[in-house]
Image (spheres, grey):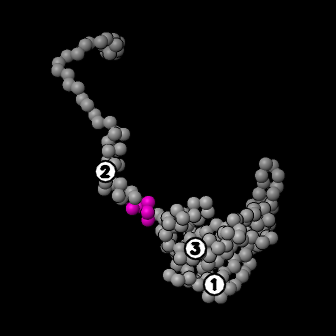
């Protein structure tokens, strides 16, 4: 009975008793936007963005021309079945470059070696620059129609690059890493 009475009281509008006060809360989005527009926050964001364009991997400049071949093989750890079809058996060694083609040539270089990229890209538009050391932003602004990427240590290690400039491209079922001396003033 007591629970029924309590339920009935909850359903009834008992009105307003006592003083009421209006509470205004700031608009959260407006607060965030106002803080984001502050000069200190904008300057910090611009500085972080600017620093994100700086590549910092050191490799020596190539002194002698060299060319080496690299294969990318993979031992299948268990049967590879795609859409019900057996693609590769457990223990089978697969050359990844038979299935996946590297269609672009990649020139690994430092920022002051960009004249080489400019020279080569005039002859072959299928070249992308991979900058390992230097400031990418001026290069991207100067060459908006070219592919310019930031290099990573993972790529350098994967392709076995020991000096720059180095051109990486596919030939048949192998990757070719061609190191070429290039004299620049810097």
Residue located beneath label 1 in the image: 181
Q: Residue farthest to the right?
A: 85
Q: Quadrant of the N terminus?
A: top left
Number of the label disc, if any, that sits on residue 114: 3
Label 1: which secondary element = loop
The x and y percentages for residue 50 are 43, 63
Q: Quadrant of residue 47?
A: bottom left
**Callout 1: few (<14), some (14-19), or many (20+) C-alpha neighbours within 10 Å?**
some
Q: Picture coordinates of residue 29 (x, y %)?
A: 36, 39
Residue 166: in sight, yes or no? Answer: yes
Residue found at x 81% / y 49%:
84
Q: Is residue 2 visible?
A: no
Name the image quarter holding residue 144.
Answer: bottom right
Secondary structure mostly taken by the magenta-highlighted segment of the chain:
helix
**Which mark is drawn over residue 38?**
2
Question: Residue 174's x, y, as percent?
Answer: 76, 73
Q: Secondary structure at mark 3?
A: helix
């Amino acid at each position: 009975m007591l629970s029924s009475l309590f339920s009935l009281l909850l359903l009834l509008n008992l009105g307003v008793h006592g003083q009421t006060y209006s509470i205004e809360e700031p608009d959260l989005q407006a607060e965030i936007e106002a803080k984001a527009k502050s000069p200190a926050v904008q300057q910090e964001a611009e500085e972080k963005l600017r620093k994100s364009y700086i590549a910092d991997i050191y490799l020596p400049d190539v002194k002698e021309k060299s060319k080496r071949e690299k294969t990318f093989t993979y031992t299948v750890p268990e049967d590879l079945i795609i859409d019900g079809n057996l693609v590769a058996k457990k223990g089978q060694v697969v050359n990844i470059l038979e299935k996946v083609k590297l269609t672009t040539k990649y020139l690994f270089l430092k920022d002051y070696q960009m004249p080489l990229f400019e020279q080569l890209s005039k002859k072959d538009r299928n070249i992308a620059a991979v900058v390992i050391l230097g400031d990418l932003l001026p290069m991207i602004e100067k060459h908006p129609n070219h592919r310019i990427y930031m290099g990573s240590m993972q790529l350098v290690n994967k392709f076995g690059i020991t000096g720059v400039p180095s051109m990486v491209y596919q030939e048949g079922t192998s990757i070719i890493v061609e190191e070429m001396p290039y004299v620049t003033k810097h």
